[in-house]
Image (cartoon, rainbow, N blue to C red):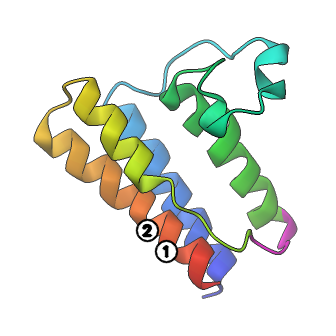
Amino acid sequence: MTVHDELGQALRELESTMKASDLWRMERPAPEAFDSTQPFCIDAMSLPQWLRFVFIARLDALVEARAPLPASCDVAPAVEAYLVQEGAKTSQRVMMSKSVERIDQLVTES
């Protein structure tokens, strides 16, 4: 199995986890939100919006094209901080964090 295959599976796992945590169903951000230059588009989107419409979408495109992956990825700490701030249940935090940590690892080690 290639890193692209593994990353594709990890992205589907994150999607599934977000759906189970009721963090998937949301409106698509306005087109100008995608022009943000802030980390995680924090000034224009919620973190779940960024995960769904930017992070997962961009990595999916790289997986589909079998394109080179970014040199590094360190999204898990931001996800953990967001979930703590939002008062997410421990089980939800663990599942989301593990999913994103796996993606971080696959991208960074590729």
- The residue that label 2 is drawn on is 102
Label 2 secondary element = helix
The residue at 75%/71% (across/down) is 69
Along the line of sight, the residue nearer the viewer: 17 or 34: 34
Image quarter hosting the C terminus: bottom right
Extent of the magenta region: 65-69
Q: Do the residues labelled 1 and 2 touch (CB within 8 Å)?
A: yes
8 with respect to 95 (left or right)? right
Q: In this view, does 42 lie above or below 107?
A: above
- The residue that label 1 is drawn on is 105
The residue at 32%/39% (across/down) is 81
Q: In this view, does 106 lie above or below 77?
A: below
Q: Is residue 66 found inside the magenta-colored segment of the image? A: yes
Amino acid residing under circle 2: Arg
Q: In which quarter of the image is residue 19?
A: top left
Image quarter hosting the N terminus: bottom right
60 with respect to 77 (left or right)? right
